[in-house]
């Protein structure tokens, strides 16, 4: 898909899928039909123009695909059984295609909770939602979970079958069901946003469509649960992080690290909204991980210059996060914060402790952090080695370019005469 309506199709995809599932009550079949409708749009719209009601057009085409599939399936059953009964002789009863008018409910939100059905394991629920609602490819989801693509494809396929076997209705869960599924829903949105903000592979550093969709869905969840501190914390984290988007790349699309960004390009309204959200959430008590991460993001955003960043408070917040979860990425970030407060050697010692954690094996940001701290400590040779190792480990081209540029910069500086 290369035409300018690609972002529209990505935005509409979960809404169309939700509408088709709601009408036909068959998640697996709908997940096959909707991509066909999206493909038809990608082929026809560039030459024929985007229809006045694109959502309705897509629902109509997907519904037609579903109708064709139902008829073909019934015909196959007739042939196999050779039992022509009145039920099979009649034309199949198929719901009329959706008019395209927006339902009072947001089908994407309902689909989000449906994909986090308790019949699924947490990893399967997250994977299925990333595929159905977030629009990520199987390969992208596999990278997010650090598993082979074939393994992820099997996991998603099993999840679809389990949803179908559960007979889950397409309706908003009860309060108790919603509470049970909320953790998976928030994790899904976090992963979708993360992939959009820092794309795991390819030529682009970020995918704005994914990040925007994650924020849109987080707003929907927040409107449903405005008093939940972690819902507010996640939305705040997204807003505070996404506020820096314009300053993260240069004119050539290359990465600009946080400490070198032009902070006048940061989105101040988003920062204000995110800060207000996390401040209110923290004042209610029952502090959770998303609120703490949002508070850290707010401290970065509030600093007028990189040198004004309140690193002691950031170190303290990461310490609180570590008490809540044995997350290796949190430990990595905590090590960097410690280095900013106590010096690079203190951070390097913590990174050495992390080297035994198999969960971080091959994770490029470990080498990148080590290279940065080694450079600060004056160990240029080892810094170059780890910058290059990090570049080799990542599949993001902008990150590769940045890391190799850092290594080249150090090599050039070492060659210059004193």
Image (spheres, rainbow, N blue to C red):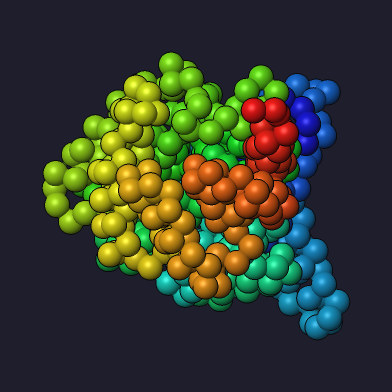
Asked if residue 239 is positioned above or below residue 339 in the image, the reply reads above
Query: Does residue 400 appear anywhere in the picture?
Result: yes
Q: Nearer the viewer, residue 202 or 71?
A: 202
Which residue occupies 36% across, 28% down? 307
* Extreme residue in the top direction: 264
Q: Is residue 172 left or right of residue 146?
A: left
Which residue occupies 28% across, 64% down? 323
Quarter of the rendering containing residue 364: bottom right
Q: Is residue 130 left or right of residue 222?
A: right
Q: Can you give x and y, in whole percent of width and height, for residue 61 in the image?
A: 71, 42
Q: Can you give x and y, in whole percent of width and height, for residue 149 in the image?
A: 71, 65
Q: Can you give x and y, in whole percent of width and height, for residue 127 in the image?
A: 57, 62
Q: Is residue 27 left or right of residue 139?
A: left
Quadrant of the image containing the C terminus: top right
Number of numbered discs visible in the structure rendering: 0
Asked if residue 217 is positioned above or below residue 183 in the image, the reply reads above
Which residue occupies 51% across, 62% down? 126
Q: Can you give x and y, in whole percent of width and height, for residue 185 in the image?
A: 42, 57
* Extreme residue in the left direction: 284
Query: Does residue 169 appear anywhere in the picture?
Result: no
Quadrant of the image containing the N terminus: top right
Which residue occupies 53% across, 44% down? 378
* Extreme residue in the front direction: 418
Asked if residue 182 is positioned above or below residue 52 in the image, the reply reads below
Q: Nearer the viewer, residue 400 or 112?
A: 400
Q: Nearer the viewer, residue 33 or 214?
A: 214
């Amino acid at each position: 898909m290369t035409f300018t309506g690609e972002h529209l199709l990505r935005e509409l995809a979960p809404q169309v899928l939700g509408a088709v599932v709601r009408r036909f009550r068959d998640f697996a079949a709908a997940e096959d039909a909707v991509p066909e409708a999206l493909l038809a749009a990608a082929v026809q719209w560039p030459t024929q123009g985007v229809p006045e009601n694109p959502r309705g057009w897509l629902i109509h085409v997907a519904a037609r695909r579903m109708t064709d599939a139902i008829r073909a399936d019934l015909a196959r059953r007739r042939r196999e059984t050779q039992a022509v009964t009145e039920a099979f002789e009649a034309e199949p009863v198929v719901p009329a295609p959706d008019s395209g008018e927006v339902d009072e409910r947001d089908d994407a939100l309902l689909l989000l909770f449906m994909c986090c059905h308790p019949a699924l394991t947490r990893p399967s629920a997250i994977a299925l939602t990333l595929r159905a609602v977030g629009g990520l490819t199987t390969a992208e989801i596999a990278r997010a979970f650090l598993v082979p693509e074939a393994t992820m494809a099997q996991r998603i396929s099993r999840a679809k079958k389990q949803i179908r076997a559960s007979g889950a209705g397409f309706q908003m869960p009860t309060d108790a069901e919603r509470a049970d599924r909320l953790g998976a829903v928030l994790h899904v949105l976090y992963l979708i946003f993360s992939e959009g903000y820092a794309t795991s592979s390819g030529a682009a550093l970020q995918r704005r469509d994914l990040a925007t969709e994650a924020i849109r869905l987080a707003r929907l969840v927040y409107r449903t649960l405005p008093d939940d501190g972690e819902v507010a914390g996640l939305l705040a984290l997204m807003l505070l992080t996404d506020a820096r988007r314009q300053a993260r790349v240069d004119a050539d699309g290359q990465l600009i690290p946080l400490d070198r960004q032009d902070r006048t390009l940061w989105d101040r309204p988003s920062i204000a909204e995110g800060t207000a959200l996390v401040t209110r959430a923290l004042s209610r008590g029952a502090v959770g991980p998303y609120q703490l991460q949002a508070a850290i993001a707010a401290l970065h955003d509030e600093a007028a210059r990189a040198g004004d960043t309140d690193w002691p408070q950031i170190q303290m917040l990461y310490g609180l996060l570590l008490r809540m979860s044995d997350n290796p990425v949190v430990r990595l970030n905590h090590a960097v914060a410690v280095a900013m407060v106590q010096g690079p050697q203190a951070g390097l010692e913590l990174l050495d402790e992390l080297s035994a954690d198999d969960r971080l094996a091959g994770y490029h940001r470990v080498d990148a952090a080590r290279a940065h701290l080694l450079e600060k400590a004056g160990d240029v040779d080892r810094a170059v080695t780890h910058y290059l190792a990090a570049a080799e480990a990542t599949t993001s081209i902008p990150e590769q370019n940045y890391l190799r540029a850092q290594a080249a910069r150090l090599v050039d500086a070492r060659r210059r005469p004193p």
